[in-house]
Structure formats: C-alpha cells, structure tokens
Amino acid sequence: MKGFLIAGTASGVGKTTVTLAILAAMRRRGLVVQPFKGGPDFLDTGHHTRIAGRAARNLDTWMLSHEANEEVLRQNAEGADAVVVEGMMGLFDGKDGATETGSSAEIAKLLKLPVVLVLDASKSARSIAAVVLGFEHFDRELPLAGIILNRVASERHFRMLETAILSACQTPILGWLPREPLIAIPERHLGLRTAEESEGHEQQLDRLAALAEEHLNLDALLSLECGLDLEQAPSLRETPKTAVRIGVARDRAFCFYYEDNLDLLRQHGAEIVPFSPLLDAALPPDLDALYLGGGYPELYAQQLSANTSMLSSIRDFAASDRPVYAECGGMIYLSQQLTAADGTAHNMAGVLPLAMEMTSKLVRFGYVTVELTQDCLLGARGTVLRGHSFHYSRVTNAPTISTSYCVQYSLSGHQEEEGYSFGNVLASYVHLHFRTAPAVAQHLVEQIRHSATEAIAQETR
C-alpha cells in the first residue's frame, strides 16, 4: 500500500501544515487516505480527521507494544488507498537523548514507512544543506525518501535552497510550501486550536490542496510504499451478547479521545452515543454509562456552568449508581467548581468533592505509567496501563477521597496517588490508552453491563 511518514527536523517546523496539504490534495484527487499521528497528541488527529474525512489514529512506540502499533495500522488501513503518518517533535526525538525509543524514527522503522523530512526554510540559505546532510548520516538504517521545504519566501528562495541541497546531499527534494497565513492554525496554551473550533473548512481544504498541487511532487509522494503487508485481514472482532450504551461527551469543550479506546469499547459491546455538555439540555435517554474525555472546559466554563439543566442531568446520572469515567477536562467538569485564570469561579457538576483552578504553566507533563492500586472500573488491582498527562490546572483542596492509581511520570520519575474513585465515578488527569492493556476495555464494558443488569433487577423487585 502507498504510505509514508512525515517527520520534522524539530518541533514547530510545520509538519502538521504539510501533512494537511498532502491529505487535502490526495482527497481532491479522489483517493481514500487514512491519517495517523505519532505520539499522544489529540489536536493534530482532530485536524487530520477533518481534512481526510476518516478518523485519524495514534501510533506510539512508548505507550503501545510493537504488535499493537502494527495492528492499529493494519486495521485502519483497510479500505484506504494510502496511509499518511505525521510524526512528532524532531525525527529522532523520543523518550531520552541516547536512544530512538518513542521517536518518529522508531515508528518508521517498525512499520517500514519511508520518511519525508520537513524543514523550516524561512531563515535559511546554503546552510540548510548541512542540516540535510546531518540527517542523512545520523542514522544510516533510516534512509530519507524525500525532503519538503516549508515557509519558503519565494520561487527564487527555493531555487537557492535547492542548489545548496543538490550540491551536497542525496535525498530528493519533493517540493516546498510558501508561508501562507490563510492555512495557519492558531495556537493556545495546550497547542493548536481544535478542529471543532475551525471555520471555513471547505475554503481551507481547497487552499491546502491547491498549494500542494502547485508546489509539491505529489506523484513522487504517491509512489512511496509502506513495507508492511497491509492487505492482511484485520483481527476478528468479538460479537457481544448484549450492547451497553455509553454517552460520550463530544463538542468544542470535550474532544480529546484516543479513537482506539472507543473502538475497543465497541468491540466488546458498547454503543457510543455522543452528546454535548455545551449545547444539549440533558443526557441522551437510556444510557448505561458516561465517558467524559479531555478538552478545553476552561475556555467554555461560563457556558458549561450556565447549562444548569445538563449539570442537573449529569448529577442525577451519577447519583443513579451508573458508571462514570472521566479524564482531565472531564474530571474538571465533574468537580465542584473551576476557578479561571482571571480569578472567576464557575460552578461545575458537583459530582466530585474537588475544587479546581487554572495554572500559568504545565502541571505534571508527559508520559505516565499507571498501576491500579485497587479494583475499579478499569480492572483489577495490579493492572498496569500507560498514558499521557498534559494540563494547565490543579486540584486546590485536599478532600478525603479514595484513589485507584499509582502514577509514575516518565520525565521526572515523580510518583503520586491519583485516579479518584468516588462511588461509581472514576476520574483522573491521565489520558489512558486502552490498547496498553486491552483487557481494560472489556472489563469496563462488563462492569457497565453488570451495573445495567443490577438496575433492571432492582426495578423488577
């Protein structure tokens, strides 16, 4: 199958813009393209999904096993003409400075993906050839399939860069993109703005596709092949006896989910029912559980707080002893109140005895390993999962509340008790990837099914 990985010399060189331009051009050519994002990022996958028209997936060699990464690629490549993977950070940046663990380079090698390297050329001339040469020689086992120069000032600037690179390097130049404000995605404290906040979708799609057609060698890109056999049939999915309905918060305030988590829940018998805490007056009917993911509740705190009918619906649901699982922004939504950066306090759902406030800097950032310290919604004591933490808020009170996680942060080595268990609610700052321990999704669905069965039994007594 056609496929390649788009990497960068560093963060911020424009990998996402280049990726979106290529996805848009492929789609305009009538191709079905499946996007992927290397690493734990939710924001880029949202933009990939919007442009490609297929749900983007995460590949991650730190959170997921090699077998799980291959399975994610194979299953989601089904029905596609090509796969495009956007890497993370710089090509060789990963868990540490001595190895390629967790890097885009490791993903490319594992999944046998040709690498297309993006360079920010905005302030470069002949010296750019030295950068390319360094990447060519740094890892001989990872030959570069091509180079794309981003933020080029003009055709004349590109010709100067091209001459320098061709004079010293072997890697083909597959084109360039100009600095184009109309396709830039605005940023904020957690990174890019979400796809849900983007406007003028068709205009942006047209502009991205036009730039790619004009400046990139798309035929050369489409000649690149993934070395894995992606034609193999995906693994068989289980056929559950009874389905359970899980309400999943999805709108501008709540949009950070690993799609594979939802896939695994479906595989074990869950029907995913989306709803909007921002816009809906109440929860959908006949739900058996809630899954409240992360996002930007702080940006919509006033609107969330003003939607008192939804807050009441959430409280009533939690009081009914049906399971509720929340991550990061979802946990903030379940708290007593959120104090914004300007000091304004906003009432939240009041399900958890937690008070939250926004902070001026990241709190406990990075990959995490979670060990369950007691039986809970996600599994038995001793179960180990991996995930990611990325937030600008903290708990301000010290409530007496049970915890179910021992969390270890990979960057700092810091450990803490977390994963708040309060009745039927499990809430945490950690975004867990269920494929790190696939039995977790099955356990969660079984817990939900058991709860629903008990509720029915009580109603018939």
Image: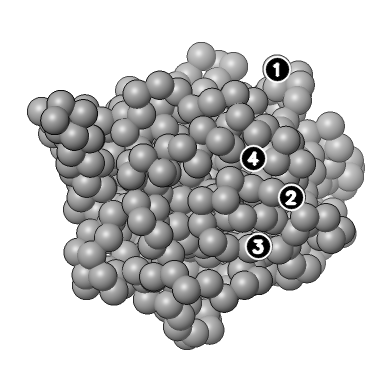
Tell me, yes or no, whether the two marked residues, 4 and 3, touch with CB atoms within 8 Å. no
Marker disc for residue 356: 3
Residue 167 spot, x, y in % from top left: 70, 59
- Tell me how far mark 3 sits from mark 1, CA to CA: 38 Å
| Mark with earlier residue (4, 3) | 4
| Mark with earlier residue (4, 2) | 4
Q: For the N terminus, give its image quadrant.
A: top left
Find residue 245 and report its image quarter: top left
Find residue 205 and report its image quarter: top right
Tell me, yes or no, whether the two marked residues, 1 and 4, touch with CB atoms within 8 Å. no
Per the image, the residue denoted by label 2 is: 346
| Mark with earlier residue (3, 1) | 1
- Tell me how far mark 2 sits from mark 3, CA to CA: 10 Å
- Tell me how far mark 4 sits from mark 3, CA to CA: 16 Å
Of tags 4 and 3, the one toward the viewer is: 3
Q: Residues within 10 Å of mark 1 (few under 14, many from 20)?
A: few
Question: By what rule are the colours in the image chosen?
Answer: one colour
> Judging from the image, what secondary structure is the residue with disc 3 in?
strand
The residue shown at (78%, 34%) is 183
- Tell me how far mark 1 sits from mark 4, CA to CA: 23 Å
Q: In this view, does 379 lie to the left or right of 58?
A: left
Residue 327 spot, x, y in % from top left: 48, 53
- Tell me how far mark 4 sits from mark 2, CA to CA: 15 Å
